[in-house]
Image: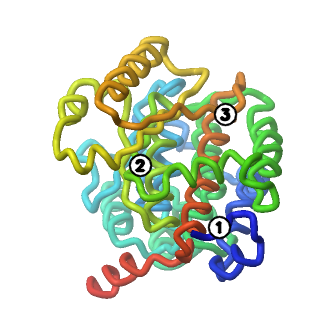
Amino acid sequence: MANLDQPNHIKAIDQQDMLKSIEELPDQIEHCWGEIKNFVLPANYIRINNVVILGMGGSGIGGMLAKALAMLDSKVPVEVANFYELPKYVGTDSLVIAVSYSGGTEETLAAFREAGKRKAKLVAITTGGELASVASNFKAPVYKISYKSQPRAALGYSFVSTLGILCKLGLIDLGKDDVEETILLMRGIRTKLAPTVPTYQNEAKKIAMTLQNVFPVTIGAGVMAPVAYRWRTQINENSKHLGFDLMLPELCHNWLTGLRLPADILKQMYVLFLQSKHDHPRNKQRQNIIGQLLQKKGIKFDTITVQPSSSILAEMLLMLYLGDYVSYYMAILDEVNPTSIEEVDFLKKQLG
């Protein structure tokens, strides 16, 4: 088992410096927020009946986070489409935002081209590639990401650019200082989760050690549901570790009945409730009752909280940021490269 308190050992495992991208997330947010303020949308984009955000994998999580926030404010539906097909309702009064870090994600490209054929209003968010070319052919605005990393590590750009566009259209109502407060709080937690902070004082390291050799299940409600998804995908990609995520209150109507078999899996399960100050009171009550059930069945669980904030955005991103560090330290514990994605690369190569 790797020692999380030996910086030289961490560097030897993290040879492509995934840690740098994790550390820079609040800086990404600050930079992107400054840029997106000056991003110009055509005047007729204000007249829309629905929004569809296209994106896969690390490029898609930003849309899921934005959708969760839009649920609280938007008077028009905001949906995420992470497949080849475009929803049938998309037409001239739709806004379609395509997010692909590489610009070559085939599912996103297929749906974006179809949106262009239907004369939907289009925006592309990418570093370039084919998506930028397709957007140019349709005369659609492109927000250019100028940050080199794995797609999942450029979340500050893919999420905040999407968030900024929805704010410009009045679909998400952020408080005047929400983004600034979020950046400040994230920088504060960054100092507490850094590799130089010893394990006994470092929450991310302690959680990572708890999750070693178990099957993690992350659970969130409301705005924490996509954060639970992000925790799971980061555990998959950074840690090379299986796990899955669930959403409250939906899991109360099905998943609970599966907590009997197979017994060997249940023994390995470790449930993490990602709790927010902004959770619906009934979801908090449901979580307490589920905890009682898990305890009776001998299934380990814990409740994770971050510094409460009046800003939903801040609490969402603080929890997400903690999860990024947890997944990183899990990778170090198992001595696996947190950057590599060999299985995904193999799949893409086979698909041609």
Question: SS of the residue at dot 1?
Answer: loop
Q: Earlier in the sequence, mark 3 or mark 2?
A: 2
Split into 4 quadrants, where in the image is the C terminus? Answer: bottom left
Amino acid type at circle 2 is: Pro
Question: In this view of the protein, which residue sits in the foreground, 258 or 173?
Answer: 258
Please report the residue visible at 39 percent of the width from the left and 41 percent of the height from the top.
79
CB under 8 Å between discs 1 and 2: no
Name the residue carrying label 2: 216
Disc 3 vs disc 2: which is toward the camera?
A: 2
From this view, report whether residue 219 is shown above or below residue 100. above
Amino acid type at circle 3 is: Val
Number of numbered labels in the structure image: 3
Disc 1 vs disc 2: which is toward the camera?
A: 2
Please report the residue visible at 57 percent of the width from the left and 69 percent of the height from the top.
1
189 left or right of 258? Answer: right
Name the residue carrying label 1: 145
For the residues labelled 1 and 2, the Cα–Cα distance comes to 32 Å
